[in-house]
Structures are given as structure tokens and as C-alpha cells.
Image (spheres, helix red, strand yellow):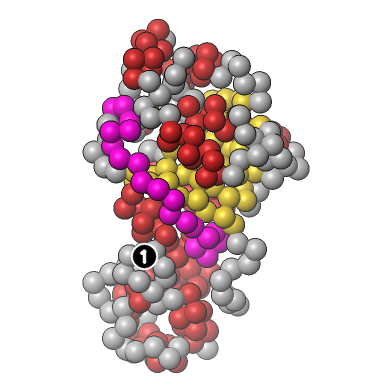
Amino acid sequence: MNLCDLNDLRDLLGRHGFRFSKSMGQNFLIDPAVPRDIADASGAAPEWGVLEVGPGVGPLTVELARRAGRVVSVELDKSLLPVLGETLRDYPNAEVVSGDVMKLDLDALLAEKFGQAPVMACANLPYNITTPVLTKFVETRGIRQFTVMIQREVAQRICAAPGTSGGSSFSLFLQYYMEPEYLFTVPPEKFYPAPKVTSAVMRCVRREKPPVETEDETLLFRLMRGAFALRRKTLANSLSSALGLPKETVLAAIRGAGLAETVRGEQLTFEDFAALCRAMGK
């Protein structure tokens, strides 16, 4: 069976009485090169464990199982469990866990399933849960890197260099902990049913240390979120609104950080935010 052949896929889903769920954002790959390329790009190897989220019918799971020591896939849709039972039966190193990744204790799951082995995550993520799942990946320290397929515009934003117009507060958060790399684009016709947007694959590797040093990480993240709260406004206006501080107080800190009073939040680099954090803490 070719899991990416449309006829085989329809036959497989029909045998199990599967129906697509719009709320779960289910779009299955129908080009075998895509899961193969994702697995190759992930760097999966025998010494690695892989946590996969949303295996669907398992084409990426199979490619990962051919490369990694062990693959554990978390699937929310219970109707896909018998499908995966069939498609993964020849891969004893692949296991499916039924559940919601946002509700699972990933630290406990990684310890139980992978022991001391290094762990990476892989996922073809529904667009409506991209940010919370990536946040959970970042916050799960046992995940050393992750390779995900997400909406192209979101991947571009996440990978945008700090200080450029393409970034966001979330891209700064993610880049504080990870080093992202935009890998390749996947057009809608590679899926069944075809989504309305173009997808992209990116890889994020955990940093050994943050890009800047700060004595108040909580304040640093408040500043990064606040800088984008009113994106069309100046940094002073945005931070004043977000932090509930007088504009003059914010302007004094901006000047103290060596920044222009008219600077916008999207123009700040990590070094700029660290300097602003120090100035705000005085």
C-alpha cells in the first residue's frame, strides 16, 4: 500500500469508515516525496527517539520509523487508531498514543517512552493549533529539536531575523530558545483534501544558551510582547499601552537603551531588547 497514493488512501479510509473532521484541520499528504523529505530533514537516526504529533494515516510515521530508533505518535482522532494499526503493523518501533498533545505531560511521556535517548519532535500541524503546540515543544526541555510543516506565512514569520518587519513577538520567543531554519515549501495540491493555503517545513534546533543575557527574563518577554501589542504605533506608545506605564517613563528607558524615540517594536534586535530591559529595571 502506498499511503500517499490517492486511490490507496481512499480505499484505506473507506475500509475503516473514516470521515474528515474540519475542526481538526485534517489534510493528508498525497506525494510520497514530502514525508520522505521531512524525515530526511529532521535528522532522524537510530540513536534518536521521535515524538510525532498528528500522524494521520502514517506516511511520515513510516519514514521516521525507517530512520529512528523509536517513534511515538500522538493522535487525537480516535477514528484513526485502527487505520494506524494497519499502516504501522510492520514497524514495531512505532507506537501510537491516543490523546491531546496539549493535555499530555510531555516530560513524563518522553521519560517513559525514550529514557535517556535524545528526542526530536516532528509534526504536520493543523494551522489552528500551530502556536500552542510549538510553544509546548519549546517549553519541553527534553525536545532538542523539532521539524514541522505549518502554514508558509507563519514559518516565514517565525524564521524572520529580529529587527526586521517580518517578525513577531512569538518569533522572538521561539528564537530566544531555538534556532529556526526555513527548509522548503509544500503547495496545496500535495494534500487531500487540498487546503486553501500553502504550507512550509521548518526545523528548529535548541540553543545551548540564549542569544542575549538578562537579569530579568520575565521583564524581557513582557517587553517583547508589549513591543508588538500596537504594531502600527511607535515602541513608546505600544509599551506604554501594554505595560500600563506613563509614556515619558517608557521614553526615558528607550533613550537609556540608546534607541531613537521614534523606533518601532519590529525594529528591535535581541540586543536592543536586552538593553531596554536593563534601562527599564533601573
The type of residue carrying mark 1 is Gly
**Residue 9 location (% of width, % of height):** 38, 17
Residue with the most extreme right position: 116
Q: Going 29% across and 43% down the picture, which residue do you hit?
A: 198
Residue with the most extreme front position: 33
**Residue 184 location (% of width, % of height):** 40, 48
**Residue 209 location (% of width, % of height):** 63, 67
Left or right: 116, with 41 as reference point: right
Secondary structure beneath disc 1? loop
In the rendered image, the vertical position of residue 213 relative to residue 131, given as above or below: below
Q: Nearer the viewer, residue 198 or 125?
A: 198
Q: Going 57% across and 25% down the picture, which residue do you hit?
A: 96
Say few, some or many: other residues with alpha carbon within 10 Å of mark 1 (under 14 / 14 to 19 / 20 or more): many
Segment tinted magenta in the rendering? 175-193
- Residue 180 among those drawn in magenta: yes
Find residue 107 and report its image quarter. top right
Q: Nearer the viewer, residue 95 or 255?
A: 95
Specify whether residue 13 is in view. no
Left or right: 1, with 249 as reference point: right
Left or right: 260, with 121 as reference point: left
Q: Going 65% across and 63% down the picture, which residue do you hit?
A: 208
- Residue 135 among those drawn in magenta: no
Q: Nearer the viewer, residue 34 or 112?
A: 34
Residue with the most extreme top position: 15
Q: Nearer the viewer, residue 102 or 180?
A: 180
Find residue 214 and report its image quarter. bottom right
Specify whether residue 210 is in view. yes
In the rendered image, the vertical position of residue 160 relative to residue 86, given as above or below: below
Q: Going 52% across and 88% down the picture, which residue do you hit?
A: 282
Residue where numbered disc 1 is placed = 167
